[in-house]
């Protein structure tokens, strides 16, 4: 055992840690409650409007909106999940605990990546299963599942760095709400998921297309819907190559920038900060 | 393994400045392999800052620090494997159990195992050692403050460190847990040859554990001595109390025994309820802290500077009490 490479050894511990955290999460009533809440909200909305037709497509609302909702939830989970986790674990000492052991931070981040990615699975399942039971014509062609897979993988790689960056930069977990939630909400609201992007001002349309959330939704729609539905999109096309380019581009930027931010954050961690954060949180509760 | 005379921890003119406030203004000390050293000082004296600099968790403003031959601020992961850390405040991993957390963090040390020093410690043995066997599978958020602290100590030593830093390790311990902790520290030092630096507010603890004490005040080390040596510095302050008739007397004198002899020679049988209380570590410490807090840090530093065993009569400054 002593011949093992310490870095790979640490990453292995981290992956097992992520699996363990995932196991704890799905067994926790708090996390179960969150999954069920989002599922009820999403499926409930689709059910209430199950007979509405989406103009210009000849499709029912659940068919068009389900892929968009899935795309949004992935973006939301991949940003807010790591942002909160990092901000919290910076404060409670989890990060420092790992800083104190050899190659511990590599293990910690491998664990975060594993756990946060896995967390999206139950999120998808609780929405997909009831949706397929309740609504017809959701998946136009089975080959769409292949598209779903790569869109999700690329989408997570493109959006999770935002979450890690927010978690690394926010001064305290209480600030994740303002720093993290607001931009995500803004992007979500303008992502063309709730109403067509073409209704926005021209400049906003350009800005929104610079960020990954819109493309995640578009990619998901291209996976689920028949090709004829592309007419309702910008340019009347699924723009698959553009989707790969934008999501891939953000994934590359994330892979380059995130380690720098995380290293900077970890270097600044001290025990006194944890003490200060505890005092601050006590103050806040009062 | 180092020989006994090896210096394991060394600071030279260590300085730390926060904004325009100097917390450390030139800290110098050395710790040799196998020593147990206590860092004492009033609140805000910079004990935690000092220990965090040595742990590599805080970047000093100036000066030098060397731990196990490396600068902690730029230390390697291999260096991490040889050091252990117990911080002041931790409330992480609430959903985990002590066994899971200890096993996982210990696992990081396995590539650093050597024939002389098998790493990590066995999880069950270590839980037994810190008295957490019975609670090993309970969630950490159900543990009391003292129990959680014992887990912190276990995590600090799971990699069998050559140097161990502990910041107020016994905060929240009941007397029995405290005694068990003292036994553990003595064993670590005796069996594993671990070099230990700890901060504490408990002078009895310092006296019991430490082979040497460092007192930090006014941003400097104002005393570096054994408990005995430190206590003797105010040996001039032996307190003698007695009653004669209805009157109670108390006096601070240089030589309590001689004073009592004279007392009996003059008053004979009239002397009742005689108490001769030699100065203890606490007296020295309180005197020092009072000097410091009254804004006489430099005077305090002068008072307690110098070699150990300095004759009491040379101390011309009386601590105000």
Image (cartoon, coloured by chain):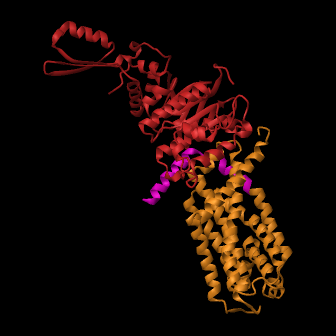
Chain colours: A orange, B red
Instruction: Give the main secondary structure of the magenta stretch.
Output: helix
Q: Relative to B218, is A120 above or below?
A: below
Task: Pick out the residue farthest to the top.
Answer: B265
- The image quarter in which residue A178 lies: bottom right
The residue that appears at 84% across and 74% down in the rendered structure is A242
The image shows residue B41 at horizontal and vertical percentages of 47, 32
The residue that appears at 46% across and 35% down in the rendered structure is B178
Q: Relative to A160, is B317 above or below?
A: above
Residue B20 in sight here: no
- In the picture, measured across the screen, residue B196 lies left or right of residue A82, that is left
Task: Pick out the residue farthest to the right.
Answer: A241
Q: Relative to A10, is B217 above or below?
A: above
Q: Nearer the viewer, residue A282 or B145?
A: B145
Instruction: Tell whether position A136 is magenta.
Output: no
- The image quarter in which residue B112 lies: top right
- In the picture, measured across the screen, residue B320 lies left or right of residue A71, that is left
The residue that appears at 63% across and 57% down in the rendered structure is A86
- In the picture, measured across the screen, residue B68 lies left or right of residue A245, that is left
The image shows residue A19 at horizontal and vertical percentages of 69, 57
The residue that appears at 16% across and 11% down in the rendered structure is B269
Q: Give the magenta-colored segment's residue range.
A: A258-286
The image shows residue B309 at horizontal and vertical percentages of 46, 14
Q: In which quarter of the image is the N terminus of chain A?
A: top right
The image shows residue A105 at horizontal and vertical percentages of 69, 48
Q: Relative to A22, is A272 above or below?
A: above
Task: Pick out the residue farthest to the left.
Answer: B246
Q: Quadrant of the C terminus of chain A?
A: bottom left
Q: Count the labels in the image.
A: 0
Residue A6 in sight here: yes
């Amino acid at each position: 055992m002593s011949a093992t490479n310490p870095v790979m050894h640490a990453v292995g511990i981290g992956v097992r840690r992520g699996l363990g955290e995932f196991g704890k999460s799905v067994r926790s009533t708090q996390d179960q409650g969150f999954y069920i809440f989002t599922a009820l909200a999403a499926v409930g909305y689709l059910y209430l409007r199950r007979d509405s037709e989406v103009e210009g497509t000849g499709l029912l609302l659940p068919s068009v909106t389900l892929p968009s909702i899935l795309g949004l939830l992935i973006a939301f989970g991949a940003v807010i999940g790591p942002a909160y986790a990092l901000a919290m674990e910076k404060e409670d000492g989890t990060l420092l605990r790992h800083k104190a052991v050899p190659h511990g931070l590599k293990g910690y981040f491998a664990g975060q990546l594993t756990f946060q990615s896995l967390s999206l699975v139950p999120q998808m399942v609780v929405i997909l299963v009831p949706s397929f039971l309740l609504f017809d014509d959701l998946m136009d062609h089975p080959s769409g599942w292949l598209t779903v897979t790569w869109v999700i993988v690329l989408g997570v790689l493109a959006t999770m760095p935002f979450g890690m960056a927010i978690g690394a930069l926010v001064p305290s977990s209480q600030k994740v709400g303002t720093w993290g939630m607001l931009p995500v909400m803004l992007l979500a609201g303008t992502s063309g998921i709730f109403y067509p992007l073409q209704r926005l001002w021209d400049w906003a349309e350009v800005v929104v297309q610079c960020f990954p959330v819109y493309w995640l939704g578009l990619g998901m729609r291209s996976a689920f819907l028949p090709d004829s539905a592309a007419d309702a999109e910008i340019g009347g096309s699924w723009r698959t190559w553009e989707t790969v380019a934008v999501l891939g581009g953000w994934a590359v930027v994330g892979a380059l920038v995130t380690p720098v931010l995380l290293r900077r954050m970890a270097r600044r961690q001290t025990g006194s900060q944890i003490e200060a954060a505890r005092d601050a949180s006590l103050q806040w509760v009062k | 393994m180092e020989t006994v005379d090896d210096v394991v921890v060394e600071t030279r003119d260590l300085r730390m400045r926060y904004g325009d406030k100097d917390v450390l203004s030139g800290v110098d000390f050395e710790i040799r392999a196998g020593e147990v050293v206590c860092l004492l000082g009033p609140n805000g004296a910079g004990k935690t800052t000092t220990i965090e600099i040595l742990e590599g968790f805080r970047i000093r403003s100036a000066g030098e620090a060397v731990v196990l031959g490396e600068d902690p601020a730029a230390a390697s992961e291999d260096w991490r494997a040889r050091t252990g850390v117990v911080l002041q405040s931790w409330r992480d991993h609430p959903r985990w159990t002590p066994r899971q957390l200890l096993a996982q963090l210990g696992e990081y040390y396995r590539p650093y195992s050597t024939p002389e020093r098998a790493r990590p410690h066995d999880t069950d043995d270590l839980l037994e050692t810190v008295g957490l066997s019975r609670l090993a599978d309970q969630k950490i958020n159900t543990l009391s403050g003292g129990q959680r602290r014992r887990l912190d100590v276990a995590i600090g030593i799971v990699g069998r460190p050559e140097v161990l830093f502990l910041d107020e390790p016994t905060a929240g311990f009941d007397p029995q847990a405290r005694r068990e902790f003292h036994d553990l520290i003595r064993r670590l030092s005796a069996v594993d040859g671990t070099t230990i630096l700890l901060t504490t507010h408990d002078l009895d603890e310092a006296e019991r554990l430490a082979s040497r004490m460092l007192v930090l005040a006014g941003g400097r080390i104002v005393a570096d001595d054994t408990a005995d040596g430190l206590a003797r510095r105010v040996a001039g302050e032996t307190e003698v109390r007695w009653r004669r008739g209805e009157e109670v007397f108390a006096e601070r004198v240089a030589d309590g025994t001689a004073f009592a002899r004279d007392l009996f020679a003059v008053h004979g049988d009239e002397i009742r309820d005689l108490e001769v209380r030699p100065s203890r570590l606490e007296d020295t410490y309180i005197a020092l802290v009072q000097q410091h807090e009254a804004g006489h840090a430099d005077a305090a530093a002068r008072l307690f500077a110098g070699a150990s065993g300095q004759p009491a009569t040379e101390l011309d400054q009386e601590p105000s009490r």
